[in-house]
Image (tube, helix red, strand yellow):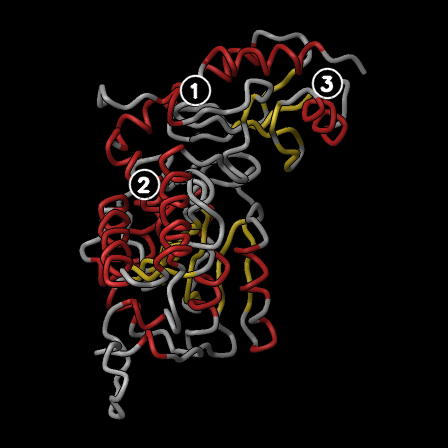
Amino acid sequence: MTKTISLIDEFPLDDNLIYLNHAAVSPWPLRAQQAINRFAIENVYQGACHYPEWMAQETHLRDQLAQLIHAESTDDIALLKNTSEALSVVAHGLAWNRGDNIIISDEEFPSNRIVWESLQQQGVELRQISLASASSAEQALIDAMDNNTRLLSISSVQYASGLRLNLPVLGEACSRHGVLFCVDAIQSVGALQTDVRAMQADFVMADGHKWMLGPEGLAFFYSRPAAREQLHLHQYGWHMVEDYLNFNNRDWQIAHSARRFECGSPNMLGIQALSASLSLLLEIGMDVVEQQLLDNSRHLFAEIRATKNLQILSDTAEGRFAGIVLFQHQHIPAAQLYTRLMEKGIVCAARGRGLRFSPHFYTSEDRISEAVRVADGLES
Protein backbone atom coordinates (compact mmCIF):
# COMPACT_ATOMS: atom_id res chain seq x y z
CA MET A 1 0.00 0.00 0.00
CA THR A 2 1.24 3.51 -0.78
CA LYS A 3 2.67 4.84 2.47
CA THR A 4 1.38 8.37 1.93
CA ILE A 5 -2.25 7.23 2.07
CA SER A 6 -3.83 7.38 5.51
CA LEU A 7 -7.04 5.38 5.58
CA ILE A 8 -7.94 6.93 8.92
CA ASP A 9 -7.82 10.35 7.26
CA GLU A 10 -9.61 9.13 4.12
CA PHE A 11 -12.49 7.61 6.09
CA PRO A 12 -13.20 9.85 9.12
CA LEU A 13 -16.38 7.97 9.99
CA ASP A 14 -18.39 8.91 13.05
CA ASP A 15 -16.92 7.13 16.07
CA ASN A 16 -20.45 6.10 17.09
CA LEU A 17 -20.90 4.06 13.92
CA ILE A 18 -19.59 0.72 12.77
CA TYR A 19 -20.19 0.84 9.02
CA LEU A 20 -20.80 -2.62 7.56
CA ASN A 21 -23.11 -1.77 4.67
CA HIS A 22 -20.87 -1.19 1.64
CA ALA A 23 -22.99 -3.64 -0.36
CA ALA A 24 -25.79 -1.05 -0.15
CA VAL A 25 -24.31 2.47 -0.14
CA SER A 26 -20.73 3.26 0.85
CA PRO A 27 -19.36 6.27 2.69
CA TRP A 28 -17.24 8.47 0.47
CA PRO A 29 -13.53 8.88 1.09
CA LEU A 30 -12.56 12.38 2.15
CA ARG A 31 -11.02 13.12 -1.23
CA ALA A 32 -14.45 12.69 -2.87
CA GLN A 33 -15.97 15.28 -0.54
CA GLN A 34 -13.08 17.62 -1.26
CA ALA A 35 -13.56 17.19 -5.01
CA ILE A 36 -17.25 18.04 -4.68
CA ASN A 37 -16.49 21.05 -2.49
CA ARG A 38 -14.02 22.39 -5.05
CA PHE A 39 -16.48 21.81 -7.87
CA ALA A 40 -19.32 23.51 -5.98
CA ILE A 41 -17.20 26.56 -5.20
CA GLU A 42 -16.11 26.79 -8.82
CA ASN A 43 -19.74 26.63 -9.99
CA VAL A 44 -20.80 29.35 -7.54
CA TYR A 45 -18.05 31.81 -8.39
CA GLN A 46 -17.07 30.94 -11.96
CA GLY A 47 -19.94 28.95 -13.44
CA ALA A 48 -18.86 26.83 -16.39
CA CYS A 49 -15.91 29.05 -17.23
CA HIS A 50 -13.61 26.04 -17.15
CA TYR A 51 -15.91 23.54 -18.87
CA PRO A 52 -13.05 22.15 -21.00
CA GLU A 53 -11.40 21.06 -17.75
CA TRP A 54 -14.62 19.33 -16.74
CA MET A 55 -14.56 17.45 -20.04
CA ALA A 56 -10.96 16.45 -19.34
CA GLN A 57 -12.07 15.07 -15.97
CA GLU A 58 -14.77 13.05 -17.73
CA THR A 59 -12.14 11.63 -20.06
CA HIS A 60 -9.93 10.83 -17.08
CA LEU A 61 -12.78 8.95 -15.37
CA ARG A 62 -13.20 6.77 -18.45
CA ASP A 63 -9.47 6.04 -18.32
CA GLN A 64 -9.76 5.11 -14.65
CA LEU A 65 -12.72 2.81 -15.29
CA ALA A 66 -10.95 1.13 -18.22
CA GLN A 67 -7.98 0.48 -15.93
CA LEU A 68 -10.22 -0.75 -13.12
CA ILE A 69 -12.00 -3.36 -15.25
CA HIS A 70 -9.18 -4.02 -17.75
CA ALA A 71 -11.24 -2.87 -20.73
CA GLU A 72 -9.37 -2.83 -24.00
CA SER A 73 -10.44 0.75 -24.76
CA THR A 74 -12.27 3.66 -23.18
CA ASP A 75 -14.44 3.54 -26.29
CA ASP A 76 -16.10 0.50 -24.70
CA ILE A 77 -17.30 2.43 -21.63
CA ALA A 78 -20.45 4.54 -21.34
CA LEU A 79 -21.39 6.64 -18.33
CA LEU A 80 -25.03 6.06 -17.42
CA LYS A 81 -27.25 6.81 -14.42
CA ASN A 82 -27.32 3.37 -12.81
CA THR A 83 -27.10 -0.37 -13.29
CA SER A 84 -30.81 -0.65 -14.06
CA GLU A 85 -30.51 1.79 -16.96
CA ALA A 86 -27.61 -0.17 -18.40
CA LEU A 87 -29.51 -3.45 -18.10
CA SER A 88 -32.50 -1.84 -19.81
CA VAL A 89 -30.27 -0.67 -22.67
CA VAL A 90 -29.38 -4.32 -23.23
CA ALA A 91 -32.81 -5.82 -22.65
CA HIS A 92 -34.67 -3.42 -24.89
CA GLY A 93 -31.86 -2.93 -27.38
CA LEU A 94 -31.68 -6.52 -28.57
CA ALA A 95 -34.08 -7.76 -31.24
CA TRP A 96 -35.89 -10.67 -29.63
CA ASN A 97 -37.72 -13.53 -31.30
CA ARG A 98 -40.69 -15.30 -29.81
CA GLY A 99 -39.36 -18.47 -28.17
CA ASP A 100 -36.00 -16.98 -27.17
CA ASN A 101 -34.99 -17.58 -23.58
CA ILE A 102 -32.85 -15.73 -21.03
CA ILE A 103 -31.09 -17.36 -18.10
CA ILE A 104 -30.63 -15.72 -14.71
CA SER A 105 -30.37 -17.11 -11.19
CA ASP A 106 -33.16 -17.24 -8.63
CA GLU A 107 -31.16 -14.95 -6.30
CA GLU A 108 -30.91 -11.81 -8.43
CA PHE A 109 -31.54 -8.31 -7.17
CA PRO A 110 -34.73 -6.95 -8.82
CA SER A 111 -32.66 -4.85 -11.25
CA ASN A 112 -31.44 -8.04 -12.90
CA ARG A 113 -34.83 -9.72 -12.87
CA ILE A 114 -37.57 -7.19 -13.61
CA VAL A 115 -35.92 -5.95 -16.78
CA TRP A 116 -35.94 -9.48 -18.23
CA GLU A 117 -39.47 -10.19 -16.98
CA SER A 118 -40.58 -7.16 -18.99
CA LEU A 119 -39.74 -9.06 -22.18
CA GLN A 120 -42.20 -11.87 -21.52
CA GLN A 121 -44.91 -9.96 -23.40
CA GLN A 122 -42.72 -10.42 -26.48
CA GLY A 123 -42.77 -14.18 -26.00
CA VAL A 124 -39.33 -14.35 -24.38
CA GLU A 125 -38.94 -17.01 -21.69
CA LEU A 126 -37.10 -16.18 -18.48
CA ARG A 127 -35.40 -19.13 -16.77
CA GLN A 128 -34.52 -18.53 -13.11
CA ILE A 129 -32.05 -21.19 -12.06
CA SER A 130 -31.57 -22.28 -8.46
CA LEU A 131 -28.00 -21.84 -7.27
CA ALA A 132 -28.34 -22.97 -3.66
CA SER A 133 -29.55 -26.45 -4.56
CA ALA A 134 -26.89 -27.08 -7.22
CA SER A 135 -23.59 -28.82 -6.64
CA SER A 136 -22.07 -26.29 -9.02
CA ALA A 137 -23.77 -22.93 -9.52
CA GLU A 138 -21.96 -22.39 -12.82
CA GLN A 139 -22.85 -25.81 -14.18
CA ALA A 140 -26.50 -25.34 -13.23
CA LEU A 141 -26.60 -22.15 -15.30
CA ILE A 142 -24.75 -23.77 -18.21
CA ASP A 143 -27.00 -26.84 -18.17
CA ALA A 144 -30.04 -24.58 -18.55
CA MET A 145 -28.83 -23.39 -21.95
CA ASP A 146 -30.35 -24.73 -25.13
CA ASN A 147 -30.57 -23.71 -28.78
CA ASN A 148 -33.04 -20.93 -27.95
CA THR A 149 -30.91 -19.31 -25.24
CA ARG A 150 -29.95 -15.78 -26.32
CA LEU A 151 -28.45 -14.37 -23.14
CA LEU A 152 -27.17 -15.23 -19.67
CA SER A 153 -27.34 -12.38 -17.17
CA ILE A 154 -25.83 -12.94 -13.76
CA SER A 155 -24.60 -10.98 -10.78
CA SER A 156 -20.88 -11.40 -10.17
CA VAL A 157 -21.67 -11.63 -6.44
CA GLN A 158 -25.19 -12.26 -5.21
CA TYR A 159 -26.46 -9.31 -3.17
CA ALA A 160 -28.08 -11.35 -0.39
CA SER A 161 -26.18 -14.63 -0.02
CA GLY A 162 -22.84 -13.15 -1.04
CA LEU A 163 -22.19 -16.06 -3.42
CA ARG A 164 -19.37 -15.27 -5.83
CA LEU A 165 -19.59 -16.75 -9.32
CA ASN A 166 -16.73 -17.99 -11.49
CA LEU A 167 -17.28 -15.58 -14.36
CA PRO A 168 -14.57 -16.87 -16.76
CA VAL A 169 -16.17 -20.32 -16.64
CA LEU A 170 -19.55 -18.84 -17.51
CA GLY A 171 -18.08 -16.58 -20.17
CA GLU A 172 -16.32 -19.48 -21.88
CA ALA A 173 -19.55 -21.50 -21.90
CA CYS A 174 -21.51 -18.59 -23.34
CA SER A 175 -18.91 -18.12 -26.06
CA ARG A 176 -19.02 -21.83 -26.87
CA HIS A 177 -22.83 -21.84 -27.09
CA GLY A 178 -23.18 -18.53 -28.93
CA VAL A 179 -24.96 -16.94 -25.96
CA LEU A 180 -24.54 -13.30 -24.99
CA PHE A 181 -22.99 -12.84 -21.53
CA CYS A 182 -24.19 -9.95 -19.34
CA VAL A 183 -22.71 -9.32 -15.87
CA ASP A 184 -24.23 -7.16 -13.16
CA ALA A 185 -20.95 -6.39 -11.40
CA ILE A 186 -22.18 -3.90 -8.83
CA GLN A 187 -21.19 -6.17 -5.93
CA SER A 188 -17.64 -6.80 -7.13
CA VAL A 189 -16.15 -3.83 -8.98
CA GLY A 190 -14.18 -1.87 -6.42
CA ALA A 191 -14.04 -4.91 -4.15
CA LEU A 192 -12.35 -7.50 -6.36
CA GLN A 193 -9.96 -7.35 -9.27
CA THR A 194 -12.08 -7.27 -12.43
CA ASP A 195 -11.09 -8.26 -15.97
CA VAL A 196 -13.91 -8.02 -18.49
CA ARG A 197 -11.80 -9.61 -21.20
CA ALA A 198 -10.83 -12.61 -19.06
CA MET A 199 -14.50 -13.23 -18.29
CA GLN A 200 -15.36 -12.91 -22.01
CA ALA A 201 -18.25 -10.61 -21.14
CA ASP A 202 -20.37 -8.89 -23.76
CA PHE A 203 -21.90 -6.43 -21.29
CA VAL A 204 -20.85 -5.40 -17.78
CA MET A 205 -22.45 -2.70 -15.65
CA ALA A 206 -22.10 -1.33 -12.13
CA ASP A 207 -23.14 1.70 -10.09
CA GLY A 208 -20.41 3.67 -8.38
CA HIS A 209 -22.07 4.01 -4.97
CA LYS A 210 -21.20 0.62 -3.49
CA TRP A 211 -17.68 -0.82 -3.49
CA MET A 212 -16.35 1.93 -5.77
CA LEU A 213 -17.03 4.37 -2.91
CA GLY A 214 -18.70 6.95 -5.15
CA PRO A 215 -22.02 8.80 -5.29
CA GLU A 216 -25.39 7.50 -6.42
CA GLY A 217 -26.52 8.50 -9.89
CA LEU A 218 -23.47 7.44 -11.93
CA ALA A 219 -22.62 4.01 -13.34
CA PHE A 220 -20.44 2.55 -16.05
CA PHE A 221 -21.69 0.36 -18.88
CA TYR A 222 -19.08 -1.74 -20.66
CA SER A 223 -19.96 -3.26 -24.02
CA ARG A 224 -17.79 -5.38 -26.29
CA PRO A 225 -17.77 -3.76 -29.76
CA ALA A 226 -19.35 -6.68 -31.62
CA ALA A 227 -22.07 -7.00 -28.97
CA ARG A 228 -22.61 -3.23 -28.88
CA GLU A 229 -23.55 -3.30 -32.57
CA GLN A 230 -26.46 -5.63 -31.74
CA LEU A 231 -28.17 -3.04 -29.54
CA HIS A 232 -30.81 -0.82 -31.13
CA LEU A 233 -31.04 2.66 -29.64
CA HIS A 234 -34.19 4.08 -28.08
CA GLN A 235 -32.74 7.36 -26.82
CA TYR A 236 -31.23 10.04 -29.00
CA GLY A 237 -29.60 13.37 -28.25
CA TRP A 238 -26.70 15.68 -28.91
CA HIS A 239 -24.10 13.72 -26.91
CA MET A 240 -24.47 10.32 -28.61
CA VAL A 241 -23.33 11.27 -32.11
CA GLU A 242 -19.93 11.44 -33.76
CA ASP A 243 -18.47 14.96 -33.82
CA TYR A 244 -20.86 15.84 -31.00
CA LEU A 245 -19.35 19.29 -30.46
CA ASN A 246 -20.28 20.33 -34.00
CA PHE A 247 -23.75 21.61 -33.14
CA ASN A 248 -24.51 22.63 -36.74
CA ASN A 249 -23.93 19.18 -38.16
CA ARG A 250 -27.11 18.03 -39.92
CA ASP A 251 -25.54 14.88 -41.34
CA TRP A 252 -24.97 13.28 -37.95
CA GLN A 253 -24.00 9.68 -37.31
CA ILE A 254 -24.37 7.53 -34.21
CA ALA A 255 -21.12 7.37 -32.25
CA HIS A 256 -19.08 4.25 -32.93
CA SER A 257 -18.06 4.11 -29.28
CA ALA A 258 -20.18 3.32 -26.24
CA ARG A 259 -20.92 7.04 -26.02
CA ARG A 260 -23.85 6.18 -28.31
CA PHE A 261 -25.72 5.20 -25.13
CA GLU A 262 -25.26 8.66 -23.56
CA CYS A 263 -27.97 10.76 -25.12
CA GLY A 264 -27.49 13.98 -23.13
CA SER A 265 -25.25 16.03 -20.88
CA PRO A 266 -22.98 14.08 -18.51
CA ASN A 267 -23.33 14.08 -14.74
CA MET A 268 -20.35 16.35 -14.12
CA LEU A 269 -20.95 16.51 -10.36
CA GLY A 270 -20.93 12.72 -10.04
CA ILE A 271 -17.92 12.48 -12.32
CA GLN A 272 -15.87 14.66 -9.98
CA ALA A 273 -16.71 12.51 -6.95
CA LEU A 274 -16.41 9.07 -8.55
CA SER A 275 -13.10 9.96 -10.17
CA ALA A 276 -11.74 11.03 -6.79
CA SER A 277 -12.94 7.80 -5.16
CA LEU A 278 -11.44 5.63 -7.88
CA SER A 279 -8.14 7.45 -7.54
CA LEU A 280 -7.91 6.04 -4.01
CA LEU A 281 -8.59 2.46 -5.11
CA LEU A 282 -6.15 2.69 -8.00
CA GLU A 283 -3.41 4.28 -5.90
CA ILE A 284 -3.68 1.53 -3.33
CA GLY A 285 -3.99 -1.13 -6.01
CA MET A 286 -6.92 -3.46 -6.53
CA ASP A 287 -4.75 -6.44 -5.64
CA VAL A 288 -4.24 -4.95 -2.17
CA VAL A 289 -7.89 -3.88 -1.89
CA GLU A 290 -9.08 -7.38 -2.79
CA GLN A 291 -6.72 -9.10 -0.38
CA GLN A 292 -7.69 -6.90 2.55
CA LEU A 293 -11.39 -7.18 1.75
CA LEU A 294 -11.22 -10.97 1.58
CA ASP A 295 -9.21 -11.05 4.80
CA ASN A 296 -11.96 -9.01 6.46
CA SER A 297 -14.54 -11.53 5.28
CA ARG A 298 -12.43 -14.38 6.63
CA HIS A 299 -12.10 -12.56 9.94
CA LEU A 300 -15.86 -12.07 10.03
CA PHE A 301 -16.40 -15.79 9.38
CA ALA A 302 -14.06 -16.68 12.23
CA GLU A 303 -15.70 -14.27 14.65
CA ILE A 304 -19.20 -15.55 13.87
CA ARG A 305 -18.11 -19.18 14.23
CA ALA A 306 -16.84 -18.37 17.72
CA THR A 307 -20.24 -17.08 18.91
CA LYS A 308 -23.02 -18.88 20.73
CA ASN A 309 -26.02 -17.43 18.91
CA LEU A 310 -24.96 -16.60 15.35
CA GLN A 311 -24.84 -18.87 12.32
CA ILE A 312 -23.21 -18.17 8.94
CA LEU A 313 -25.47 -18.52 5.91
CA SER A 314 -22.97 -17.49 3.22
CA ASP A 315 -20.71 -19.94 1.41
CA THR A 316 -17.32 -19.76 3.16
CA ALA A 317 -15.35 -21.79 0.60
CA GLU A 318 -12.41 -19.96 -0.94
CA GLY A 319 -13.41 -18.37 -4.24
CA ARG A 320 -17.08 -18.35 -3.26
CA PHE A 321 -17.21 -15.17 -1.19
CA ALA A 322 -16.29 -11.52 -1.60
CA GLY A 323 -17.31 -8.70 0.73
CA ILE A 324 -20.79 -9.88 1.71
CA VAL A 325 -21.37 -12.12 4.72
CA LEU A 326 -24.90 -13.27 5.52
CA PHE A 327 -25.72 -14.74 8.92
CA GLN A 328 -28.63 -15.28 11.27
CA HIS A 329 -29.28 -15.08 14.99
CA GLN A 330 -30.73 -18.34 16.27
CA HIS A 331 -33.28 -16.59 18.49
CA ILE A 332 -33.93 -13.18 16.89
CA PRO A 333 -35.59 -12.72 13.47
CA ALA A 334 -33.50 -10.86 10.89
CA ALA A 335 -35.79 -7.81 10.71
CA GLN A 336 -35.70 -7.38 14.49
CA LEU A 337 -31.95 -7.99 14.63
CA TYR A 338 -31.44 -5.32 11.96
CA THR A 339 -33.45 -2.74 13.88
CA ARG A 340 -31.64 -3.41 17.14
CA LEU A 341 -28.19 -3.29 15.56
CA MET A 342 -28.98 -0.06 13.74
CA GLU A 343 -30.10 1.45 17.03
CA LYS A 344 -26.65 0.63 18.37
CA GLY A 345 -24.92 2.33 15.43
CA ILE A 346 -24.03 -0.83 13.52
CA VAL A 347 -24.95 0.00 9.93
CA CYS A 348 -25.98 -3.18 8.14
CA ALA A 349 -28.87 -4.65 6.14
CA ALA A 350 -31.50 -7.36 6.41
CA ARG A 351 -31.30 -9.40 3.23
CA GLY A 352 -32.44 -12.82 2.12
CA ARG A 353 -32.85 -15.14 5.09
CA GLY A 354 -30.63 -13.19 7.43
CA LEU A 355 -28.57 -10.18 8.36
CA ARG A 356 -25.89 -8.88 5.98
CA PHE A 357 -22.55 -7.42 7.02
CA SER A 358 -20.41 -6.00 4.23
CA PRO A 359 -17.12 -4.47 5.43
CA HIS A 360 -14.77 -2.91 2.88
CA PHE A 361 -11.00 -3.21 2.67
CA TYR A 362 -10.40 -0.28 5.03
CA THR A 363 -12.69 -1.56 7.82
CA SER A 364 -10.67 -2.51 10.88
CA GLU A 365 -10.84 -6.00 12.32
CA ASP A 366 -11.53 -4.48 15.73
CA ARG A 367 -14.71 -2.83 14.44
CA ILE A 368 -15.81 -6.08 12.81
CA SER A 369 -15.22 -8.02 16.03
CA GLU A 370 -17.14 -5.44 18.04
CA ALA A 371 -20.15 -5.67 15.71
CA VAL A 372 -20.22 -9.46 15.99
CA ARG A 373 -19.91 -9.25 19.77
CA VAL A 374 -22.89 -6.89 19.96
CA ALA A 375 -25.02 -9.06 17.66
CA ASP A 376 -24.21 -12.22 19.59
CA GLY A 377 -24.94 -10.56 22.94
CA LEU A 378 -28.46 -9.44 22.08
CA GLU A 379 -31.20 -11.28 23.91
CA SER A 380 -34.50 -12.29 22.36
Q: First in sequence, mark 3 or 1: give its number.
A: 1
- Can you name the residue that lies furthest to the front here? 45
Of the image marks 2 and 1, the number of the one nearer the N terminus: 2
In the rendered structure, the answer to whether residue 301 lies left or right of residue 3 reads right
Task: Name which residue lies at 68% across and 26% down.
Answer: 342
Query: Identity of the amino acid at label 3?
Result: Gln
In percent of width and height, residue 76 lies at 25, 61
Left or right of 75, for residue 90: right
On the image, which quarter does residue 352 sit in? top right
Q: Quadrant of the N terminus?
A: top left
Can residue 213 be seen at all in this image of the molecule?
Answer: yes
Amino acid type at image mark 2: Leu
Q: Position of residue 89 (x, y in %)?
A: 44, 68
Residue for badge 1: 296
- Closer to the camera in the image, 206 or 224: 206
At x 51%, y 74%, the residue is 99
Could you tell me if the residues under marks 3 and 2 are in contact, i.e. CB atoms within 8 Å? no
Q: Earlier in the sequence, mark 3 or mark 2?
A: 2
Say which residue label 3 marks: 330
Q: Secondary structure at mark 2?
A: helix
Inspect the image, locate mark 1, and give the three-letter code of the amino acid beneath it: Asn
Rendering coords of residue 255 (x, y %): 26, 76
Q: In the rendered view, tell whether residue 111 sits above or below residue 5.
A: below
Q: Nearer the viewer, mark 2 or mark 1?
A: 2
Q: Identify which residue is drawn at 56% across, 54% down.
A: 128
Per the image, label 1 sits on a secondary structure element best described as helix
Q: Which mark is residue 278?
A: 2
Measured as percent of width and height from the top left, residue 358 is found at: 51, 29
Front position among marks 3 and 1 = 1
